[in-house]
Amino acid sequence: MPGTLSGFPIMPSQAHAPLTGIRHPRYAGSWYEADSTKLALEIEEYFRQAAKTRKTVSEDSTGDRSKLALIVPHAGYLFSGSTAACAYLSAKDSKIKRVFLLGPSHHVPFNGVVLPDVQFFGTPLGDLEVDTQTIAALGNYPLFRFARQVHDIEHCLELQLPFVRQTFGQVKIVPLLIGQLSCEEEIRLVAEILKGHIGREDLVIVSSDFTHFGPRYGYEPFKGNIREGISHLDMQAFSHMAKLDLEGFVDFAARTQATICGFFPCAVLLSLLPGSAEATLLRYSTSQDTSAEDKDNSVSYMAIEFAGKPWPENPTQASAAQEVIQLSEKDKKALLTLARATLESYVKEGRVPQPNEHGIILEETLKSCFGAFVTLYKKVAGDRQQTRSSRADKELRGCIGSIWPVKPLYRAVAENAVAACSRDYRFKPVKADELAHIEIEISILTPPRRVSSYLEIELGRDGIILSKHDRQSVFLPFVPLEFGWDLAQTLSQLCLKAGLRPDDWLEGASFDVFQAQSVEESS
């Protein structure tokens, strides 16, 4: 069943008709010029102003430095046009063929990401074509849904489109409105999904204004030295973004109650960018710099460029080249000790211990984000003479995991150990008298990557995620081998697990694969 979003229907992509039609400009003639000739001249004038006022960026002489992303304001052009132009001018000579547009929703609250269901976004300077294939693919993932009306009434992406059209020509666009994301894990999840689609000739543009100060916005954290106070807030935000410091950025917003309208799109960007990305603040201004704004209220604007090592040549294959994590023997022992301690403490006492309670030292590898599953087995009587049991000698007692690399590995293992013993719907919770007979297996996953066909799946090597409509199911790599299934049987079982018909994998389903390294307790 489709969900609802403040009265608007949200449809999963595969239940959705082909993307057609056009989103016409809603704010032309009020927030910016509607006449195409006048608008083109206005933008060129902003570019001329930007060339004189923006901070220049030195280019990498090796050539291995690309424009990756921009943060651009979205107020009426009278207020923020000259600042926006500084961002676009910095990327004007880049070879861009597609633009990912990320912005907030000012009018409709929702959780996740809303996709457009049209083929074109109109501007007075000419239409821009939506990359409907990418939009449809994104609609298969968690947190991504369609809702045309949300895009129809939103201004933040529309204000970018004339600049995009004038700067890059008839590029394709991927317009995404990002609503509330409940935690850092959801922020990282959206970013991980987008990473599988952003490639070498793409540019990410985040549409955001910064501090909204004054009675109009219900935000007056200080009374004196207002300009200095606003600037201090904005520069704190920029300092976290420049360091790609997602945790610090989230903490800053919670501590200051910052009124950054594009906070969640900015947060996704921080998680999305490669570690090599460097930020440059090209221009900073506020609405107070114009005579049109009253002096009791202020909105801040920043033009920020992120540049660094280019996006991958082939994003859908980038994670395929990533090797399974190489754990040292010390790391393996630490994870198994953590999983065992967590399992026993939770079953006996209902609590989750801290790693240092058991002398576990968290190396950097264990603090890095990975997907992980924890599988519990109950040993079958009579096989105790073996030093390491095969799965055929055990009974499954619980298995739960997190597919996407959105949590530090040690946390993912601890949380999934609790879930496997208490929240696997197929089994009753583990009891204390069973603990001596429980064996633990931990599977550490590579990031999922989309494959174009189920024919690309290799049984035994690949874990499989099947998605169709709003249903999804997953098998770890060993599952088909354990049951002796061929590919067709495996996919049929995935369909049944997802609540679909056995043959629903034949048409309209999508598939992601991953690899896994397993760490097991010895008998």
Image: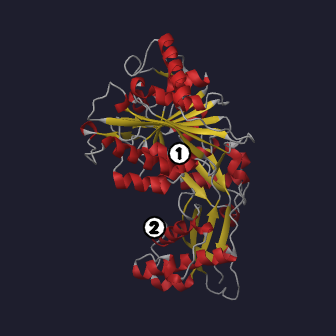
Residue situated furthest right in the rendering? 62
Q: Tell which of 291 and 252 is nearer to you.
A: 291
Measured as percent of width and height from the top left, residue 171 is found at: 61, 26
Amino acid on which the number 1 mark rests in the picture:
Leu
Please determine whether, in this image, residue 37 is positioned above or below residue 299: above
Examine the rendering and report whether any part of residue 34 can be seen.
yes
Q: Which mark is residue 423?
A: 2
Please give left or right for residue 53 compared with residue 169 in the image.
left
Measured as percent of width and height from the top left, residue 379 is found at: 60, 81
Please determine whether, in this image, residue 445 is positioned above or below residue 157: below
Regarding mark 2 in the picture, which secondary structure is present there?
A: loop
Q: Tell which of 36 and 350 is nearer to you.
A: 36
Q: Tell which of 274 and 439 is nearer to you.
A: 274
Please determine whether, in this image, residue 517 is positioned above or below residue 7: below
- Residue under the point 31% across and 40% down: 213
Pointer 1 residue: 269
